[in-house]
Amino acid sequence: MMKRILVAMACAAGSVTAFADEPVKIGMLQGFSGPTESLVGPMAEGGEHAIREISESGLFLGGRTVEIIRADSTCIDSAAAVAAAERLVTSDGVHGINGPTCSGPTTAVINNVIADAGVVTISPSATSPALTTIEDNGYFFRTAPSDARQGVIIGEILSEQGISSAALTYTNNDYGRGLADAIQSAFEDQGGTITTMSSHEDGRADYSSEVASLAAAGGEVLIVAGYLDQGGRGIIQASLDTGAFERFVLPDGMVGSSLTDHFGSAIDGSIGTNPGSDSPGVDLMAEISAAEGYAGDDPFVPEAYDASALILLAMQSANSTDSSVYKDHIMSIANAPGEEIYPGELAKALEILVNGGEINYIGASAVELIEPGESAGNFRETVVRGGQFETVKYH
């Protein structure tokens, strides 16, 4: 019954003619609480920046404005994420959703709400490889690349640096397990050895026993596929306290200023990876975000800006807020051919579309979508120097 109600209400909300004088509603469904809270603040700012840019242009769908509705997907509570998504669809009548943040809640939201309600949802940061093949009825996209790609990048980096063995710990959820499997496979393909691979639970006060087991297996570095505001930080703290490991490999969920603010130079030499590009859009995003008081080059901020932009530009391309209609325009506006569009140029993109032209949305993260609607994948390699993440190269 709930699924039939969701479908009916979503279809009603998607009618561009029935609500022509009302604002278009976009849900910002992010982990405002939980283990990635410090990352989500700037991400939401980035996603909402694109929405304001389009709404204030006066060009969107004949002058319609856009309303932002925030909802908390957490990062580890799938039931809370589903409830939040249901409220966005049924009570708020959103026409599209930017989010969720993390892979576990994203999977639950797709399975229990989005696929049946038929509301376009673009995650800027859910990276589990399992999301590539999830049954979403064509309504789910993501601007962050799959962890299958990140695993390959990490394997290559370790090989390039002459690291032949590593211990690996991962947060015990969809994100952690998928990423850990991808890293192990890629590193072993490069001739490396994962000495042990074990999960850890978030929310524990002490991780000394987990670290003792990891240290017993040995390894030149410890790969921590976790969250910077939760168990991942605890693993690093216990490692430093006991002297078990001094150098860490930090995938995307561990890359953020709150980690280096906490540990400073104690983790110098550690390696980080997160989605990133050296395209012109990166510098443009940094410029426009500085004027708004947030960091446009923080992890997943460019992807969040791009997720919102793609939703609204696809609506303009389709001349419809109906997800079943405009979902089929997302791939075309995100890829060639067409006029290249960067951050700060969304009014220009709207004008081109209004006049019947084509756009190739490059955005802040060098967007290129591949089937079934996910990023082809660019990654930034960083190293901690002087207690700060510094970019080394792009992959």
Image (cartoon, helix red, strand yellow):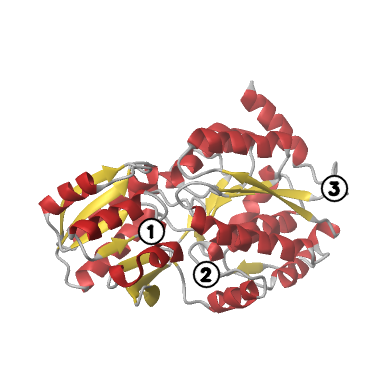
In the image, is 336 to the left or to the right of 379?
A: right
What separation in Å lies between label 3 and label 1 (alpha carbons)? Answer: 40 Å
Residue under numbered circle 3:
22
Q: Is residue 124 visible?
A: no
Q: Earlier in the sequence, mark 1 or mark 2?
A: 1
State which quarter of the image contains the N terminus.
top right
Image depth: mark 2 or mark 3 in front: 3
Image depth: mark 1 or mark 2 in front: 1
Most foreground residue, 70 or 119 = 70
Amino acid type of the residue tagged 2 in the rendering: Ala
Residue 366's label in the rendered image is: 2
Most foreground residue, 232 or 156 = 232
Q: Earlier in the sequence, mark 2 or mark 3?
A: 3
Residue under numbered circle 1:
254
Q: Earlier in the sequence, mark 3 or mark 1?
A: 3
Amino acid type of the residue tagged 3 in the rendering: Glu
Secondary structure under badge 1? helix
Give percent across and percent down for residue 257.
45, 66
What separation in Å lies between label 2 and label 3 (alpha carbons)? Answer: 32 Å
Residue at horizontal 50%, vertical 61%? Answer: 300
Marks 1 and 3: in contact by CB < 8 Å?
Answer: no
Q: Is residue 67 visible?
A: yes
Give percent across and percent down for residue 24.
77, 50
